[in-house]
């Protein structure tokens, strides 16, 4: 059974537990009012970056989910230090599989979490601590914001996309070490952006060649002369390829950032 599904079942089981055993506690898992915003205008909801914190019932739900995994998962593994390490590594890999976002400093800061998530989760009576998940996600979003800001700066200057020198970039970084610090991370972000820019540039060059070839072979009759008028309306200035590529890449990065801005307490818990 998938962990996300197990979490949903655990949440339902915990809601029933709350009704029966601890009725003064709220049965839902909503975050405090200050941590989520729901408005009709989606753009307004995206103005403030999330800084999420555990909800009042998160520790209890994590406890129930862990016990259900132990009892109902087909492998029936004890939620011990070994499983704790797998969950920790899997969470980081889900967020940053290419090892481009988190720095080694970030990982060093959370090193203690890796081997003790089971102890934090399995404290009885809801006294556990789910803060590690939120610490990691909030740092992830902070790094994403830094990356998007840096990308926008690079895209403003066409000189950053001069491909007159030989360069190499490692595309698959899954087995590579994370950047040591933010400066090294920015170097990787710049390399990846230049690679994406070059991909778009080559794609446009190829498309133009196909269009030019099709134009010369598809028409055998003369093209009528263009009729001129005295209209004073000037056509809108067409963007250059460089401007269009910069706009495209900027929108792509900002779209990814907006996706994570919409995460709430429950998304992080799952």
Image (cartoon, helix red, strand yellow):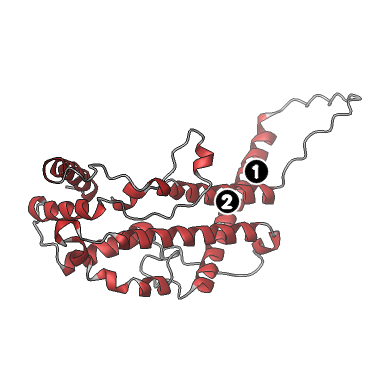
SS for callout 1: helix
Count of labels in the image:
2
Residue at horizontal 77%, vertical 40%? 237
Mark 2 lies on a secondary structure that is helix
Q: Is residue 153 above or below residue 183?
A: above
- Which residue is painted at 69% across and 59% down in the image? 158
> Rounded to the nearest whole Å, what is the CA distance between mark 2 and mark 1?
20 Å
- On the question of residue 168 being in view, the answer is no
The furthest residue to the right: 230
Could you say where residue 268 lies in the image, as x and y percent from the top left? 33, 52
Instruction: Please tell me whether residue 20 is drawn above or below residue 110 in the rendered image.
Output: above
Q: Which x, y percent locates residue 44?
A: 53, 40
Left or right, residue 59 beside residue 68: right
> Where does residue 63 sit, x and y in percent of width and height?
17, 55
* Along the line of sight, the residue nearer the viewer: 243 or 47: 47
* Residue position for label 1: 208
Circle 2 is placed at which residue position?
249
């Amino acid at each position: 059974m998938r962990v996300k599904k197990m979490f949903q079942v655990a949440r339902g089981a915990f809601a029933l537990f709350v009704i029966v055993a601890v009725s003064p506690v709220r049965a839902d898992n909503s975050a405090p009012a200050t941590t989520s915003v729901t408005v009709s205008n989606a753009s307004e909801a995206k103005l403030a970056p999330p800084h999420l914190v555990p909800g009042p019932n998160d520790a209890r739900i994590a406890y129930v989910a862990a016990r259900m995994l132990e009892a109902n998962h087909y492998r029936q593994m004890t939620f011990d230090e070994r499983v704790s390490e797998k969950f920790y590594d899997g969470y980081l890999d889900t967020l940053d599989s290419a090892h481009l976002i988190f720095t080694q400093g970030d990982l060093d800061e959370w090193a203690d979490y890796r081997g003790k998530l089971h102890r934090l989760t399995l404290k009885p009576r809801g006294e556990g601590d789910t803060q590690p998940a939120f610490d990691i996600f909030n740092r992830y979003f902070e790094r994403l914001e830094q990356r998007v800001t840096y990308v926008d700066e690079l895209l403003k200057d066409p000189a950053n996309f001069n491909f007159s020198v030989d360069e190499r970039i490692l595309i698959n970084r899954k087995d590579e070490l994370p950047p040591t610090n933010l400066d090294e991370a920015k170097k990787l972000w710049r390399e990846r952006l230049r690679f994406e820019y070059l991909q778009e540039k080559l794609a446009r060059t190829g498309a133009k060649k196909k269009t030019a070839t099709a134009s010369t072979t598809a028409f055998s009759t003369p093209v009528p002369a263009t009729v001129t008028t005295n209209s004073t309306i000037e056509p809108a200035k067409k963007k250059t390829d460089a401007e269009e590529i910069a706009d495209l890449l900027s929108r792509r990065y900002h779209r990814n950032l907006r996706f994570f801005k919409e995460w709430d307490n429950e998304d992080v818990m799952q």
